[in-house]
Amino acid sequence: MSEKVIHVDDGSFKEIVLDSEIPVLVDFWASWCGPCLALAPVIDDIAEEFGKTIKICKLNVDENQKTAMQYGIKGIPTVLFFKGGKVVDQSVGLVPKEHFKEIIGKL
């Protein structure tokens, strides 16, 4: 896993994600989820490529149900993009790296 990926939880979500000065990508995932595990290398690549301009975070939905419920996460993997503390885009399911690059380009 990339060292640039930040693991967040219910307690640190506000400070790390919502209060961030730069855009944030949050990967909502679980260890038992096959598509989540398949997406992990893509998230790592994005972190290596864009880690200076956007925060890349992961939140385990099993361990942090409060935040997952707050954002209506019903299927995983779900990736939410935050800017200024608000969700500005999202992606659900296993999608290619280019999809994330497009969204990051708009941010």
Image (tube, rainbow, N blue to C red):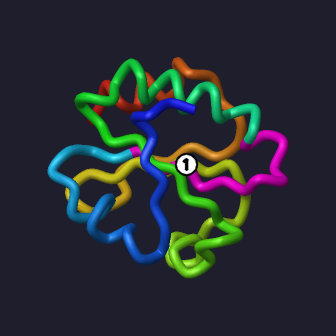
Up/down of 26 relative to 44, above or below: below
Left or right: 104 with respect to 36? left
Image x and y of residue 40, in percent:
64, 35
Q: Quadrant of residue 97?
A: top right
What percent of the width, then of the height, locates residue 70? 51, 78
| Residue lying farthest to the bottom in this orientation | 66
- Pick the residue in front: 36 or 101: 36
Q: Residue at position x 68%, y 34% from top?
A: 39
Judged left or right of residue 6, residue 62 is: right
In the rendered view, tell whether residue 83 sits above or below residue 45: below
Give how far across and how far down residue 19 sits, in percent: 21, 63
Q: Amino acid at mark 1?
A: Asp
Give the left or right position of residue 57, taking residue 66 as reference. Answer: left
Q: Nearer the viewer, residue 105 or 54?
A: 54
Query: SS for tag 1?
Result: strand
- The part of the chain drawn in magenta is 25-36
Residue 84, placed above or below residue 6: below
Look at the picture and state if 84 lies above or below 96. Answer: below
Quick check: is 20 in the magenta stretch?
no
Magenta stretch contains residue 28? yes
Residue at x 32% of width, y 59% of height: 17
| Identity of the residue drawn at 27% across and 67% down | 15
Q: How many marks?
A: 1
Quadrant including the C terminus = top left
Residue beneath disc 1: 27
Label 1: how many residues lie within 10 Å, few (<14), some (14-19) or many (20+)? many
- For the view shown, which residue lies furthest in the left direction? 21
Residue at image position (62%, 61%) is 60
- Residue, far front: 3
